[in-house]
Amino acid sequence: MELFENLEVKRGTTVLIGRPAKPFEKKVSDELLRIALQLEVAMEVHIPQCFAVGVMEQPEQICVIVVKDENIKETALAEITRYIRESKIIQEILVWILPMNSDFLSDIRAAKCQLNKKKRSIWGFWK
């Protein structure tokens, strides 16, 4: 894997998104969850398998960080890059930062690979 500054996918690009054929090892997904909990600008974090035709050479599992809007992408990139560089477990990963209004977000959510970023209250057990 390789840490890209950001996967750039232009409108109209065919992107295949789904559950990973070979998911990250548990220690890697646990480390991504630990990092996700520290990302202040991230609204959601997902780890689906993705293949952007003409952009990627082959399908691979990636880390998708969903931010409030386009203006926060650089801040999110700096944050996750810093945490990944500090990680002893994750050396390289493909990162895709998307705004909440992205056309790709419904497909990413449908893959059901979201890392649970929200801390649950014990008082919400009835929901």
Image (cartoon, rainbow, N blue to C red):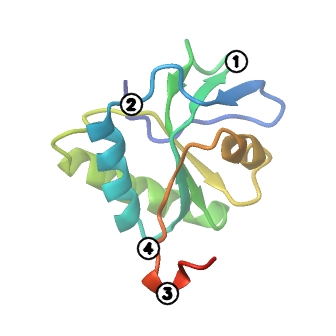
In 3D space, how far apart are the residues under numbered discs 4 and 1 (Cα atoms)? Answer: 36 Å
Is residue 124 placed above or below 25 in the rendered structure?
A: below
User: Which circle's residue, 4 or 1, is located before the other in the chain?
Assistant: 1
Q: Nearer the viewer, mark 4 or mark 3?
A: 3
Pick the front one: 110 or 45: 110
Mark 2 crowd level (few <14, some 14–19, many ≥20, 10 Å Cα): some
Find residue 66 and report its image quarter.
bottom right
Q: Nearer the viewer, mark 2 or mark 1?
A: 2
Confirm or deny contact between disc 4 and disc 3 (CB under 8 A).
no
Left or right position of 27 against 41: left
Pick the front one: 26 or 88: 26
Left or right position of 32 against 95: left
Numbered label tally: 4
Residue at 56 percent of width and 35 percent of height: 48
In 3D space, how far apart are the residues under numbered discs 4 and 3 (Cα atoms)? Answer: 12 Å
Residue annotated with mark 3: 123
Q: Tell me which amino acid carries mark 4.
A: Lys
Residue 38 position within the rendered picture, expressed as x and y whole percent measured from the top left: 35, 66
Residue annotated with mark 1: 53
Secondary-structure class at tag 1: loop
| Mark seen at residue 24 | 2
